[in-house]
Image (tube, helix red, strand yellow):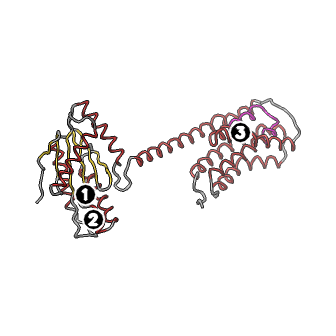
């Protein structure tokens, strides 16, 4: 069961402010229009309740509802009913009637589109019918200057309030969109770029290198014997190793470098505008830092990395060819003893930067 006050509660809070303001301004508009008719006490009381007490009742009903958004739509239909009722009670006074009807229509279409607008028109018709049953059918469209001035606050202030609410809603939606976009590009375990997002950046980097004739390097990183770590210590420890590697990457790479999780226990790094020798030094320091890690829960566990590096070459037809060279370099590091950095440039292996003892 959905928790009461869940979906749409923030919208309910914003609508309470707009309803409270709109009802108070509407009270002024309607009261001035009704005053020349000398309405009975109970009608004045109904105007006061509708103008100042109803917004709080509507808010409490929405807050306690299983679906606040649907409750707010029902509240707007009740607002529409009252609107139609007051149009009839005001004897169709032109400006107050047009003002309240247009503000109500703006509310309905903003929250529920054409469907809620049409439903609002139906309930306004019901409210009008009730007022015609209670009061003599009189048509007095004339609007005095006092009545006209009483409508000005509702016409001037209320649309600004609705515009502010729409702006805040749009700002929130943009924030959610940015967050979802970031999540779609992020690996949930490591917090780094996921496979697809990193490859997109690789394509961009390849095009930049090709157009600007600048250097660059990419690295593929593999955690040595990771399956054995999972089998021996469990997947929880394995996940901690993956998270630790992502932390080491974030702390030891430059701000211009882009790290990602390529898949499984394999990670990847783009090092823009970087010579192969410099890239090899960076990755070797990172390998040293990671292999020196002491794991408190498993003090006997030692984890190392194998790294394959490839420099950009004009001979690469596309980013895939560049990535294949890095993969070949990684294979070279693993096949020559692991825990080392191996480089390849233009199809040929480069001497290993450092062969650990």
Q: Residues within 10 Å of mark 2 (few under 14, many from 20)?
A: some
| Numbered circle sitting on residue 223 | 1
Which corner quadrant of the image does residue 315 belong to? top left
| Numbered circle sitting on residue 229 | 2
- Residue tagged 3: 118
List the single residue furthest toward the right.
Answer: 136
Q: Residues within 10 Å of mark 1 (few under 14, many from 20)?
A: many
**Residue at the spot 50% in from the left edge and 44% down from the top edge:** 173
Judging from the image, what secondary structure is the residue with disc 3 in? helix
Gap in angstroms between the C-alphas marked 1 and 3: 62 Å
Which of 72/177 is in front?
Answer: 177
Task: Tell me where residue 3 appears, x and y as whole percent.
Answer: 58, 60
| Residues shaded magenta | 85-104
Quadrant position of the C terminus in the picture = bottom left
The total number of labels drawn is 3
Q: Is residue 197 left or right of residue 24?
A: left
Residue 93 falls within the magenta-colored stretch: yes
Which of 31/69 is in front?
Answer: 69
Task: Tell me where residue 22 appears, x and y as whole percent.
Answer: 66, 42
| Numbered circle sitting on residue 347 | none
Quadrant position of the N terminus in the picture = bottom right
Gap in angstroms between the C-alphas marked 2 and 1: 10 Å
Which of 99/303 is in front?
Answer: 303
Of callouts 2 and 1, the N-terminal one = 1
Verify CB contact (< 8 Å) between mark 2 and mark 1. Answer: yes
Of callouts 3 and 2, the N-terminal one = 3
Which corner quadrant of the image does residue 218 belong to? top left
Task: Tell me where residue 330 appears, x and y as whole percent.
Answer: 21, 50
């Amino acid at each position: 069961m959905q928790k009461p006050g869940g979906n749409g509660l923030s919208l309910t809070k914003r609508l309470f402010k707009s309803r409270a303001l709109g009802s108070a301004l509407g009270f002024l508009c309607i009261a001035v229009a009704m005053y020349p008719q000398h309405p009975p006490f109970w009608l004045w009381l109904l105007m006061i309740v509708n103008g100042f007490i109803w917004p709080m009742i509507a808010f409490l009903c929405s807050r306690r509802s299983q679906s606040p958004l649907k409750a707010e739509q029902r509240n707007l239909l009740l607002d529409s009913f009252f609107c139609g009722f007051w149009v009839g009670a005001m004897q169709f006074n032109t400006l107050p009637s047009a003002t309240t009807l247009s503000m109500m229509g703006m509310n309905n279409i903003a929250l529920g589109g054409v469907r809620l607008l049409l439903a609002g028109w139906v309930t306004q018709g019901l409210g009008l019918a009730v007022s015609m049953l209670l009061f003599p059918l009189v048509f007095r469209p004339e609007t005095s200057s006092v009545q006209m001035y009483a409508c000005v606050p509702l016409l001037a202030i209320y649309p600004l309030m609705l515009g502010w609410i729409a702006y805040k809603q749009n700002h929130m939606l943009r924030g959610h969109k940015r967050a979802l976009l970031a999540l779609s590009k992020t690996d949930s375990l490591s917090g780094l770029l996921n496979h697809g997002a990193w490859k997109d950046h690789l394509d961009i980097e390849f095009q930049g290198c090709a157009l600007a004739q600048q250097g660059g390097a990419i690295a593929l990183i593999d955690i040595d014997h990771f399956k054995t770590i999972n089998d021996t210590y469990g997947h929880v420890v394995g996940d901690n190793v993956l998270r630790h590697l992502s932390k080491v990457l974030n702390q030891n790479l430059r701000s211009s470098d882009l790290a990602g999780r390529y898949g499984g226990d394999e990670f990847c790094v783009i090092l823009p505008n970087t010579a192969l020798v410099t890239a090899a030094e960076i990755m070797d320091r990172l390998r040293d830092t990671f292999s020196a890690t002491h794991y408190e829960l498993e003090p006997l566990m030692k984890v190392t990395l194998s790294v394959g590096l490839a420099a950009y070459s004009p001979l690469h037809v596309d980013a895939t060819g560049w990535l294949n060279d890095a993969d070949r370099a990684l294979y070279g590091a693993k096949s020559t003893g692991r825990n080392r950095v191996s480089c390849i440039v233009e199809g040929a292996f480069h001497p290993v930067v450092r062969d650990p003892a």
